[in-house]
Amino acid sequence: MSPTPLLSVDWTDHVTGRRGHLVVDRLVRGVASGGLRMREGCTAAEVAGLARGMTMKEALHYDPAARYVPLGGAKGGIDCDPRSPEAYGVLVRYLRAMRPYIERCWTTGEDLGLTQDLVDRAAAEAGLVSSVQAVYPLLDDEATARKRLADAFAIEVDGIGLDALVGGLGVAESVLVALDRAGRERAGTRVSVQGMGTMGGATARFLARAGLRVVAVADVRGTIVNPDGLDVEALLAARDDHGTVDRAALRPGDRKEPRDAWLAVDAEVLVPAAVSYAIGAGNQERITARWIAEAANMPVLPEAEEALAARGVTVLPDVVVNSCTNAWWWWTLFGDIEADAEQAFDRVRRSMRELVGGMLDRAATDGTSPRAAAHALVAERLPVIAERYGWY
């Protein structure tokens, strides 16, 4: 992969002075895929790294027999606190400014700080047909495909939308594959999750339902800890739109600890599912977990990962672990699965078993880290995709 993206666009909001970015790392059949995040401090370099990661995620899900043809990778980012009163106006103006790209080459959706409902509402106000309209010309039957995706978004499973579950299921399945290969029993395995938004909340649900014990979850207000296990479903039901848990839902045995306590909790599995760059050289030494599953994008810095590996900690990389939200959109839209929760869950589980298993096999064979193995798989698949569909 070239370190230089295909296209980079910087934007300044004329009303607030807020900055935004769009990076298209690669195109396949003229289109790239990648969400739009909003957070205070979001930078162009961060967005470029995320766009490169999207290229990898797309390539890893390439199946020559599937209807879904992987797209290129892209990402958008806005430097603004999503809780700010001015955030929605900034979002609408950003989408209006990026409208030519969204109409032609960039399919986008929710990411950190934004929900899909909010993106859809802002996109409509910005004059867009859809945040994924650039992919419509690639569909065999646009009307049927759009209805299938809309029907899928309308599905709820135990009070949570299907679209908000598939990504976390992919993370949870990645953890289960790693545990199974290590011969680790699920029952009694403890988990600490940073972030109770879409990805972290769903991950916590599926790991708890698989028999693991979720002993800590963190949000912007702090970390909630219970060594005997938290009531994950009660905490999910007590979240607001930003993933903050109402502390009135806590049980007598639940403790309130500082925001960074999730990092050092006694647990075998750590799931950073909130911000990028959460684990660096300065705090990695506090980690006692055996596995880290990157539910967030780029949460573990390279120098931290190197130090963790030296201590026997395995990092399951984001480009594999959190790739299923994106893949589910396209499996559904292109018609590889119907608007059905069981089909979606089955496809996610099978895909992640194959991907994570293949990555761990490659790492063992090459004597490298799981991340290096994932990158090697991408390097093999990208030329195959380019040969079949061209470089742009």
Image (tube, rainbow, N blue to C red):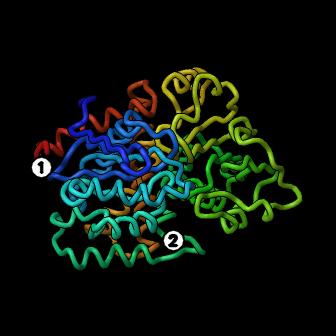
Can you say which quadrant of the picture contains the C terminus? top left
In the structure shown, which secondary structural element does the residue marked by tag 1 occupy? helix
Residue 161 - label: 2
Residue 267 in percent (x, y) is at 71, 41
| Residue 198, quarter of the rendered image | bottom right
User: Residue at the location (21% across, 38% down)?
Assistant: 6
Question: Which of the pair 241/357 is nearer the observer?
Answer: 241
Question: Which of the pair 153/107 is nearer the observer?
Answer: 107
Question: Can you tell which of label 2 and label 1 is closer to the viewer?
Answer: 2
User: Residue at the location (64% across, 42% down)?
Assistant: 269
Question: Does residue 143 sit above or below 78 in this rendering?
Answer: below
Question: Does residue 310 sit above or below 179 in this rendering?
Answer: above
Q: Which residue is mark 1?
A: 389
> Which residue occupies the extreme right position in the image?
252
Sequence-wise, which precedes: disc 2 or disc 1?
A: 2
Can you say which quadrant of the picture contains the N terminus? top left
Labels in figure, total: 2
Left or right of residue 129, residue 313 in this image: right
Q: What's the residue type where badge 1 is placed?
A: Tyr
Left or right of residue 206, residue 78 in this image: left
In the structure shown, which secondary structural element does the residue marked by tag 2 occupy? strand
Question: Which of the pair 14/26 is nearer the observer?
Answer: 14
Residue 18 in percent (x, y) is at 43, 45
Residue 323 in percent (x, y) is at 41, 50
Q: What's the residue type where badge 2 is placed?
A: Gly
Question: Does residue 122 sit above or below 60 in this rendering?
Answer: below
| Residue 371, quarter of the rendered image | top left
| Residue 20, quarter of the rendered image | top left
